[in-house]
């Protein structure tokens, strides 16, 4: 009988990183078993438990509508954790939910390992104290996170960023366009409106209107592509795309090819911005949430920039259009500036090299898996 791990994520990016970790753990310990919550990727690898799409939401106000479902899912996981005999709990980001689950694990005496740290360096820094009281080991993906947790007395290990294992920055643009059926010489703009329903509803209409303005600002007709997140249903996208002012080609499981094919990308703030930077597509970062949620977030945020590439770089290397700035006009203006200014594109691409170098080498998932097994077997 192999190890039994209770692993939990709550969103698309967590599912990506969780599946990489699960695959690495299986390679090291083939009989290992997984219970908990995850998305399609993790479930395909044998995870037993609720689908993370049931609880994925952003914003203090937006979460209210999903509270009954979130609470029921939490109770289900709590019961599963109590009923099983697990070697450890592995929590992936999603802090508001996962730290409550960590409290239950602590009460049951199950060791807690946290992979992909809550962004305590960006907002709600006081959570470090909570983490210190509940988490046995932090596996962090940014080098600047190590001293934060060491200072708080948390055992911490830097494993590097798992996106370096799944993003191929050397993928060929011409080959990508051919594989996606895109014109070899046209201007291609990628639209990434997020992985949650609320993000699609708030951001996609502005992206589509911006697309029409971008088309007007170019001499030749551009192509628009959308590498849609696996967590988003076709019906939701069709609602916005059927009467859109531009034609958009939607692709599944082709995010990196679509980004490499693109001359510019418009990307919802989140993990996708880091993926975009690693692939090398010049981008504009946008985001919008309910006004009250934004007011709360702004009061708690401790960094100037919200885009991960800008935070990792330590300076603003790509434009951010947040809340009232995320208008079709401003989005189009910033995107056209990328498309028409060779020097601006070159500057962004050069800054991306620095981001890649600061995230360590490949093998993060394997290093994280070895750390998990070492903690279990100690």
Image (cartoon, rainbow, N blue to C red):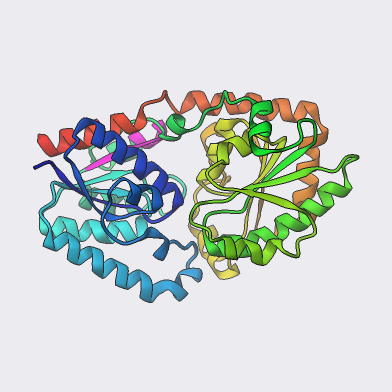
Residue at the spot x=62%, y=27% of the render?
351
Number of disc labels: 0
205 and 134: which is toward the camera: 205
| Vertical side of 363 occupied by 323: above or below | below
8 and 168: which is toward the camera: 168
Q: Residue furthest right?
A: 219
Residue 52, x across and y down, in percent: 38, 59
Can the viewer see residue 345?
yes
Residue 151: quadrant of the picture: top left
Q: Quadrant of the C terminus?
A: top left
Q: Which residues are magenta?
A: 137-146
> Would you say residue 327 sits in the magenta stretch?
no
Residue 189: quadrant of the picture: top right
Residue at the spot x=40%, y=65% of the render?
54
Q: Quadrant of the N terminus?
A: top left
| Vertical side of 101 occupied by 226: above or below | above
> Would you say residue 145 sits in the magenta stretch?
yes
Can the viewer see residue 116?
no
Residue at the spot x=38%, y=42% of the render?
17
Residue 192, x across and y down, in percent: 62, 49
Residue 228, x across and y down, in percent: 57, 51
Q: Is residue 237 left or right of residue 88?
A: right
Q: Is residue 259 left or right of residue 139?
A: right
65 and 23: which is toward the camera: 23
Residue 343, x across and y down, in percent: 78, 26
């Amino acid at each position: 009988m192999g190890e039994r791990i209770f692993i939990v994520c709550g969103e698309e990016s967590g599912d990506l990183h969780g599946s990489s970790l699960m695959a690495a753990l299986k390679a090291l310990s083939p009989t290992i078993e997984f219970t908990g919550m995850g998305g399609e990727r993790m479930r395909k690898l044998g995870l037993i438990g609720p689908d993370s799409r049931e609880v994925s939401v952003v914003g203090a106000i937006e979460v209210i509508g999903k509270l009954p479902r979130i609470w029921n899912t939490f109770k289900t996981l709590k019961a599963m954790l109590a009923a099983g005999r697990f070697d450890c709990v592995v929590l992936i980001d999603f802090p508001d939910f996962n730290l409550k689950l960590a409290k239950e694990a602590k009460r049951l005496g199950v060791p807690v390992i946290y992979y992909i740290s809550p962004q305590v360096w960006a907002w709600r820094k006081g959570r470090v104290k909570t983490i210190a009281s509940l988490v046995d080991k932090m596996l962090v993906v940014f080098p600047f996170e190590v001293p934060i947790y060491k200072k708080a007395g948390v055992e911490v290990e830097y494993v590097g960023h798992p996106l370096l294992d799944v993003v191929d920055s050397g993928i060929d643009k011409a080959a990508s366009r051919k594989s996606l059926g895109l014109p070899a010489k046209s201007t291609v703009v990628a639209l990434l409106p997020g992985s949650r329903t609320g993000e699609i509803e708030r951001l996609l209409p502005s992206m589509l209107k911006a697309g029409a303005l971008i088309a007007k600002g170019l001499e030749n007709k551009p192509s628009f592509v959308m590498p849609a997140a696996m967590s988003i249903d076709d019906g939701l996208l069709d609602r916005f795309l059927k009467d859109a002012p531009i034609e958009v080609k939607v692709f599944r499981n082709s995010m990196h090819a679509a980004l490499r094919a693109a001359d510019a990308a418009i990307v919802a703030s989140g993990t996708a911005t880091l993926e975009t930077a690693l692939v090398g597509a010049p981008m504009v970062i946008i985001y919008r949430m309910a006004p009250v949620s934004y007011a709360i977030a702004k009061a708690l945020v401790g960094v100037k920039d919200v885009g991960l590439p800008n935070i990792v770089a330590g300076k603003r290397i790509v434009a951010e259009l947040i809340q009232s700035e995320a208008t079709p006009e401003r989005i189009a203006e910033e995107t056209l500036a990328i498309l028409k200014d060779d020097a601006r594109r070159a500057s962004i691409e050069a800054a991306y090299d620095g981001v890649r170098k600061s995230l360590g080498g490949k093998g993060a998932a394997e290093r994280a898996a070895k750390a998990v097994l070492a903690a279990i077997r100690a």
